[in-house]
Amino acid sequence: MIIEYEKEYLKELYENGKCKSKKYRFDAAIIKKYQKRIDTLIAATRIEDLFVFNSLNFEALQGRADYFSIRIDYHYRLEFKTRTEGTEIISTICIVTDITNHYQ
């Protein structure tokens, strides 16, 4: 999939392992797992490829059309939405929207 980032700090976390804003501080282990999940999204050619990984706990978010989430770890989830290019599915674009605390 092609990855786009809705928020700049998400791109910085993936590319640099940290971000400029102190508002978005995460433990180094969380950042490493986040980078691994982005790599998983990049490796997937379509959304259905994520279904086979039970550890991701892939789920569609209720009340938000075309939004999905996968598990980073037990406390954090990676939220994203998808869109396709063209009338035929040429490529799936994954737009990473946020890292959220799963239990809030």
Image (cartoon, rainbow, N blue to C red):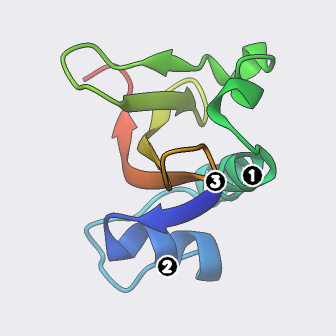
Judged from the image, the secondary structure of the residue bearing numbered disc 1 is helix
Q: Earlier in the sequence, mark 1 or mark 3?
A: 1
Residue 85: percent from the left, percent from the top?
50, 55
Residue 27: percent from the left, percent from the top?
55, 56
Question: Left or right: where does residue 92 sit relative to residue 97?
Answer: right
Give the residue type that dot 2 points to. Answer: Glu
To which residue does mark 2 refer?
12
Real-space Cα separation, disc 1 to disc 3, in angstroms: 21 Å
Question: In the displayed structure, would residue 84 be above or below residue 77?
Answer: below
Which quadrant of the figure contains the C terminus? Answer: top left
Q: Earlier in the sequence, mark 2 or mark 1?
A: 2
Give the residue type that dot 3 points to. Answer: Ser
Crowd around label 3: few <14 · some 14–19 · many ≥20 (10 Å): some
**Residue drawn at 35 percent across, 30 percent down:** 66
To which residue does mark 3 refer?
91
Judged from the image, the secondary structure of the residue bearing numbered disc 3 is loop
Relative depth, front residue between 24 and 99: 99
Judged from the image, the secondary structure of the residue bearing numbered disc 2 is helix
Residue 16: percent from the left, percent from the top?
61, 82
Question: Left or right: where does residue 45 sit relative to residue 61?
Answer: right
**Residue drawn at 80 percent across, 17 percent down:** 52
Question: In the displayed structure, would residue 73 be above or below residue 36?
Answer: above
Give the residue type that dot 1 points to. Answer: Lys
Real-space Cα separation, disc 2 to disc 1, in angstroms: 14 Å
Q: Are marks 2 and 1 in contact (CB under 8 Å)?
A: no
To which residue does mark 1 refer?
36
